[in-house]
Image: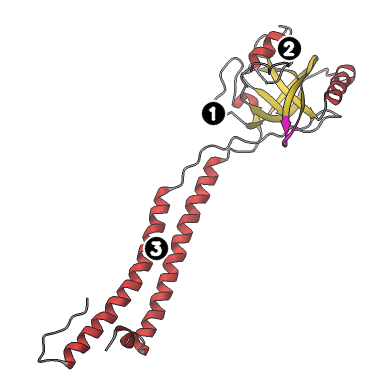
Amino acid sequence: MTFWQVARRPRWIALLVFVMAVAAVFAWLGKWQVERAVISSAQNSIPDQRAVPLSTLASPGVAMTEAAAARRVTVEAQLDTSSVMVLANRLNFGVDGYWVIGRLTTFTNNEVASLPAALGWAPTREVADAAVAGIRDSFTVEAFMPIMGRLMPPQQPTAPDPGADPTELTTMSVAALANIWPLTVPTYYEGYLVLDEPPAGLDTIESVPVITDASLNWLNVFYAIEWVVFAGFAFFLWYRLVRDALNREIEEQAPDEAPLLLN
């Protein structure tokens, strides 16, 4: 008498089918727990994409918080057309080009403040210069206008490459821009705004939310492992029941002999 001879009997085959169904349910529950852990992690890693008033996230002269970085905001501001200039070496969807930037003036909490802004992207210096000339000649604002964009933390100034023009700007450094632009509005926000809608002749600048390091919900992962263990235990229980039945039959066939236990 062998194990497989006993296991192929209808009773044990039926029990095996039942065990397989139970194990399938356990496996599905484990999969569901893993999905819940991943979904929870993804939801916690991406910031809210709804636009909120700038004043609710940042204040002039105050360092930007982690919660404010890369958030979409709305602000009523006007563009100082005399401040519009070109920023070199700016990638946009993987293509090197130029940003056209300028200074926005805002009025928040009874205080006028400056907010650097990335207005749009151009593939060549010629296109960027033409956009700057067009803005200076035709873009006039008589009142504060609603503007929407993504608030980004300031960048650090970098040393120019060998042979490059040392006066050419390549980063959105608030400190550097404050030293270049006239001190008509000396108080600056510690960050800059990437506009959702660029001026005519420029492309929209790629801006993405900051994806934070997300950790899995380890409690869900632990539960998923438990369900896998339960599924394995169901098969082990079936195996032990069949082995016990085999041992009993061997004992009944040889009552006068020492029992042969197969472990």
Seen from the viewer's position, the closer of residues 147 and 209 is 209
Seen from the viewer's position, the closer of residues 90 and 56 is 90
Determine whether the residue tagged by mark 3 lies in a helix, strand or loop. helix
Within 10 Å of disc 3 (Cα), the crowding (few <14, some 14-19, many 20+) is some
The dot on residue 167 is 2
Percent across and percent down for residue 147 are 74, 27
Q: Is residue 18 left or right of residue 42?
A: left
Q: Which stretch did the figure color magenta?
A: 91-96
User: Which label lies toward us, 2 or 3?
Assistant: 2
Identify the residue position indicated by label 3 in the image: 228
User: Which label lies toward us, 1 or 2?
Assistant: 2
Name the N-terminal-most of marks 2 and 3: 2
The dot on residue 66 is 1
Furthest-top residue in this view: 183
Q: Report the quarter where the C terminus lies.
A: bottom left
Residue 113, quarter of the rendered image: top right
Q: CA distance from mark 1 to mark 2?
A: 31 Å
Residue at x 62%, y 24% (from the top left corner): 55
